Image (cartoon, rainbow, N blue to C red):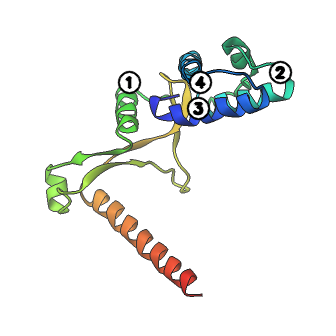
Amino acid sequence: MTETEIFAFADVVKGLQRVFPKRWDEHEQAQLQRDYFKALRKFPLSQVAAGAEAWMQRGKFFPKPAEWIEAIPKRQSAPDLSVMSDEQTREYHCAEALRYKDKPCGCLSCREAEVTEKPLRFVPEVNPDGTDRRVRDGVRDRIVVAGHWAHGFELARWYAAKGEFYEQFYALCAKKGAR
């Protein structure tokens, strides 16, 4: 899990607390969430949530971190996925921390496409069949969609597609509201 997922993790913890109620004051509650987050951070949020669901079905009390980890379903390996290189991993983690948006770029490609005032976007990579290209993040032991920072005309196309989406969305909203 990443720091950006702490609120989603808190929701998972609250779900467990609804099933296994305990009386904690606010300080104890916050400390519990921090401690459990640290203990479970090496797992993707989806696996942590699946472990909570599994524990709800078989546990009798609120799980200790070791019990929660034990309840996490074992992932089936995906041997056909490539592992990101160190450079790709650093770039992906940086993009994730920036929420896939970075400050504008003044490179030649971006100047030619006239997008020097637009923030860069980290965009997903796709396979020839149009599906997302998935790779393994070896550092955080999870499967992610490969991506790269869009520059130049690719970035311009991204913003054009975003603009078209919102035009269609608002037109549809206006149409629905008129009825």
Q: In percent of the image, x 49 and y 81: which residue is there?
A: 174
- 16 sits to left or right of 34: right
Q: Which mark is residue 9?
A: 3
Q: Residues under labels 1 and 3: Cα distance?
A: 27 Å
Q: Position of residue 175 (x, y in %)?
A: 53, 84
**Res. 2 visible in picture:** yes
Residue at the spot of label 2: 59
Provide the secondary structure element on which disc 4 rests.
loop
Provide the secondary structure element on which disc 2 rests.
loop
Task: Check disc 3: other Cα within 10 Å, few if <14, some if 14-19, many if 20+.
Answer: many
Going by the numbered disc 4, the residue's amino acid type is Phe
Mark positioned earlier in the residue sequence (3 or 4): 3
Going by the numbered disc 1, the residue's amino acid type is Asp
- 37 sits to left or right of 89: right
Residue at the spot of label 1: 86
Q: Position of residue 41 (x, y in %)?
A: 54, 22
Q: In percent of the image, x 70 and y 34: which residue is there?
A: 15
Mark positioned earlier in the residue sequence (2 or 1): 2
Q: Which mark is residue 43?
A: 4
Task: Check disc 1: other Cα within 10 Å, few if <14, some if 14-19, many if 20+.
Answer: few
Nearer mark to the viewer, of 2 and 4? 2
Q: Are marks 1 and 3 in contact (CB under 8 Å)?
A: no
Going by the numbered disc 2, the residue's amino acid type is Gly
Q: Is residue 33 above or below residue 132?
A: above
Nearer mark to the viewer, of 1 and 3? 3
